[in-house]
Structure formats: structure tokens, C-alpha cells
Image (spheres, grey):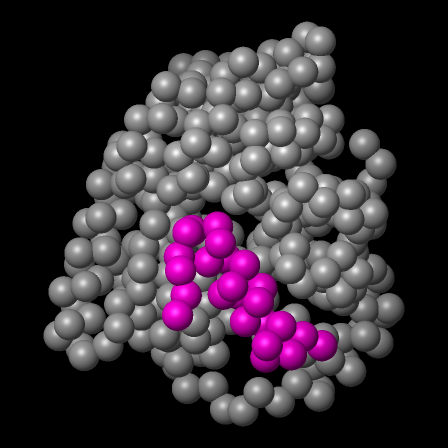
Amino acid sequence: MKENIVSTSTRERCVTSYAARTQYRPGEIHPPHVKVRDAIDIHCHAHEGQQNPFDLAKRASQAEMKGLLFKSIFGGDPAESVREVQEEANRWAEKEHIEPIGCWAGFVCGRQTTPVSAKIVREMIESGVIAIWLPVFTHANTLNTVGTYRRLVEGGNAAGWVGPLPWDKALKLGHYNLDEKGELTPEVREIVRICADKGAALFFGHATHKEIYKLAEEVDKVGLDRVVIDHPFSPFINLSVDEMKELSKVGILFNFTYDELSPLLGVDPQLMYNAIREVGLEHFTLSSDAGEPLFPDSVEALRLIRAYMEAFGLTQEELYTVCTLNPARVVGLKLN
């Protein structure tokens, strides 16, 4: 995989960022109204040890967001857990005399190395999940790029972290969406078809380029029109602008995240903005991918990525497109 360079030297970035940050004057910010009104975050985390989903839903409601799609959440039934959060948010918002956000549930295939199962995907969608992620943390690409928990490699209760694994070992331990002939596995093809039939969104997870192009062929074939590639400038995905242009022809959305902008990945926001301009606003969303304690909460993370893109040149109308209109397509929300 050819490396797509999305970071720049500190000196070079200083030149572009100073022009952006010194001229960005959105007006005073008065928390919790943090200038994310009407935004929909299609990628946030709230499972055990991460941000509290009940508090997050209240904060997002105060900030006048439209909704949150929980990629992960506490408990074994994500749809039921999200219903609990929605009910609590509704009760609280009624007392506060404000409009509650909408909350939606996602499901990640292959968590904790469990098999990728079309049957489980169907059950999850029928229970209320509206978005499916193909393997992420346990994908071979993740294991090969950053490594994983030692216990997943050595078994038992081994503590600590193992760095990037050789591809052969990563492929043996992790998930991969293609078979020996380089075609989508039957389970993954069936998952794509189920999402198309049920009107669920499909996120490609941490798929390699080979997988991405095969998935693109399949979603085009079955007519699935709610398809997302997360953090395209992350080391896991590493798409070029030309590749985005090619993949956008089948209706795929590219979801830029605060994770990419954070010090942990360090993507240059100027290059992110350039990609949106070159590929086209209709093909992008902005989200937080937040939840970990090293990140701001999802509302603040969304404010940050939105503010960066505004500072570098997106207008209010364009921000509404990438923060509200396009995300609304993903969660199936009809806007007035």
C-alpha cells in the first residue's frame, strides 16, 4: 500500500495554520452552546471505560445537536442500551424545556475476535441497530498497523500490548473480508445485501484497499446507498484524493474525524480541507470518533473538527452539508 502523506513539517504547517487560526473569528463561545447546532455525529464511542452516554446525550442536547450514532456502547445489546439513553435524554430534556437529540445504535462485526456473522447482523438490525461496521479493532489491518492486546496474541490473561504484527500472523489472528481468491467472503457479501434490504448503513471498518474496492463493487451491485469510510487519512485507511474521487462514484461517503486531527495521529487540517474541496462536499461528513479519555468528549471534538474546517475555508452552508445533511442520510433522518 502506497503511503498517502497527510502530515507536514511543523514549520510548514505553521505557515498555513497561522493564517487560518488568526483570522478565524466565529464570535464568543459560551459553553455548552459550542457552535455545533444541528450537527449529527455519526461515529462516537461510549462503551465501558469511555465517555458516559447519558451525560453525552444531555450535553449534545444542550448544544442543540440533532443526534449521535453510537458505534459502541455499554451492554451486550446496543439497540436496547441506546433506547435507555434516548429515554433518559427525553425525560431530562422535558424537565429542562429543551429539544432532546436523537440517538442511534451501531454494531461492530467481529468484536473480541468473534466470527463475522450475517445472522447476527440481521438480528441486530431487527432489534433496532441502524448502522453496521465491518471489523475494526480485530481486523488484520489493525493488528498489522498498530498491534493489539497481548492477551489476544498469547491467550489467557497476558497483560500489556504487542506492537505491529507481521501480515501473515495478523491475518491468522484477525479478520479479513476476502477469501483465498481475493473475493468477498460469503458472510460479508450477505451482510452487504442485508444492509441494502433493511436500509441500514454500512461502514467499511479498517479494511485494506483491496477490500475497499471489492466492497465498493458489491455495494454498487446491490444498490446500497448508505456507505461510509471512516477516517480516510488515518494509517489504517490511507486513501489518496484520487482514490476518493474514484470511490465516490458509487456514493461512498468519507467521514473525517477528530481522531485524525488529534495529536495522536496529527493529520494536517489543510490537507483535509483540500480533499473536501477537490473531491466535493457531497462526499464528506465530519464526526468525533471520540470517547477515549485522551480525547475531548464527542461534542467538543465535533466542535473542534468543524471549527478547523470553517477556519480553513468552509462556509456556514457548506458546514451544514458535511455536519448535518450528509450525516442525516447515514442515519436515515428526514430533515424539515
**x and y, in percent, of residue 298 in the image:** 44, 61
What range is drawn magenta here? Answer: 313-336
87 or 225, which lies in front?
225
Evaluate whether residue 9 shows in this view.
yes
- Decide whether residue 329 is among the magenta residues: yes
Horizontal side, residue 279 vs residue 173: left or right:
right
The residue under the point 43% across, 31% down is 197
Q: Is residue 318 above or below residue 230?
A: below
Considering only vertical position in the picture, is 180 above or below 326? above
Image quarter (top left, top right, bottom left or bottom right) of the N terminus = top right
The answer to which of 77 and 74 lies nearer the viewer is 77
Q: Residue at x 67, y 75 (%)?
A: 314
Judge whether residue 135 can be spotted in this image.
no
Instruction: Please give left or right for residue 107 compared with residue 142 in the image.
Output: left
Give the prevailing secondary structure in the magenta stretch. helix
For the C terminus, the image quarter is: bottom left
Answer with left or right where residue 294 lies relative to residue 198: right
Residue 168 is situated, as x and y percent measured from the top left of the image, at 69, 13
